[in-house]
Image: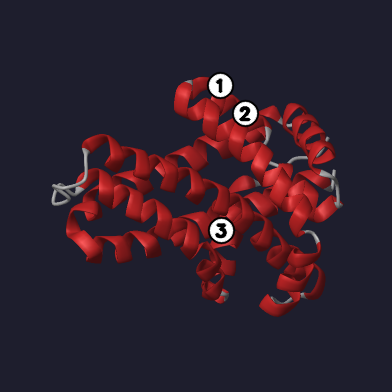
Amino acid sequence: MGTVDLWREMRKSVDLLMRYPQIILAAFPSAFLVSVANFLVWDRRFSRITFFFQWGTSILLVLCGFFLALLTLGFITFLFWDFEVRGEIRFRRSLRMFSRRFYEIFFAALIVGFLVGFFSFWFFLPGLVFGFLLMFTIPAVVVEGDDPFGAIRRSFHLVIENLGECFTFTVLALFLLVIGYLLFWIFGFASLVGIAINTILGGAILAYLSVLLSRFYLGLSRF
């Protein structure tokens, strides 16, 4: 079984985003929802909104943002796959391909979002395990043309066959997400300016992780 140089893929993912920074725009809707949720949690000027309603709204926005992040992963995977094949990125062409596979990606995102989101909210560790095992589900739908359940099986098998590399990727992703959360928390006190900053920051992190995961998947699936 071959291996993937994850550190090289990290550098190439940065290079791709530097060359095509417009990729980050695809991640803005998801980042915006999470930024607003963060703002509701830490801003105390909403005196007429009850505490529970404020937190409930924040949780709902985070779940919606996570679901949008999975759809964003599907679209960015199309962008990267098209780049691998043709050597260039064309948003319009990738959007057409994405629209043709939208229902499969939508249902795959729905399944993964429910399993990871529900178990992460109530039981953190099982949610983390599901996120680990299902990390390649969306790329498998995009690249292999699998149905959602076939993509889930594909993700399970690929993760089990490459436990060490997948664990390293997961640790890296969690590290970036923790850094992102700390920055979200800091800028969350900056009111509406903080929402704008966090949207840009969150979009950049999500776009980077999506590109890196796409590269990682293609690298492993070649072997």
How many C-alpha atoms fall within 10 Å of the one at disc 1: few (<14), some, or many (≥20)? some
Q: Distance between the residues labelled 1 and 3?
A: 31 Å
Residue beneath disc 2: 130
Location of residue 55 with respect to 206 vertically, above or below: above
Q: Distance between the residues labelled 3 and 2?
A: 27 Å
Q: What amino acid is found at the position of numbered circle 2 in the picture?
A: Phe
Mark 2 touches mark 1? (CB < 8 Å): yes
Task: Say which amino acid is labelled 1.
Answer: Pro
Tag on residue 126?
Answer: 1
Tag 2 secondary structure: helix
Q: What residue is rendered at 48% in x and 57% in y?
A: 30
- Label 2 to label 1: alpha-carbon separation: 6 Å
Residue 6, which numbered label? none
Compared across the picture, whether 128 is left or right of 6 comes to left
Mark in the foreground, 1 or 3: 1
Position in image of residue 3 (x %, y %): 74, 40
48 over 12 or under it: above or below: above
Tell me the SS state at disc 3.
helix
Q: Where is residue 34 in the image (x, y as percent from the top left)?
A: 40, 51
Residue on which the image places disc 3: 11
Report whether residue 23 is seen.
yes
Q: Which amino acid does label 3 sit on?
A: Arg
Say left or right for 172 vs 111.
Answer: left
The residue located at (30%, 61%) in the rendering is 195
65 vs 6, nearest the viewer: 65
Q: Earlier in the sequence, mark 1 or mark 3?
A: 3
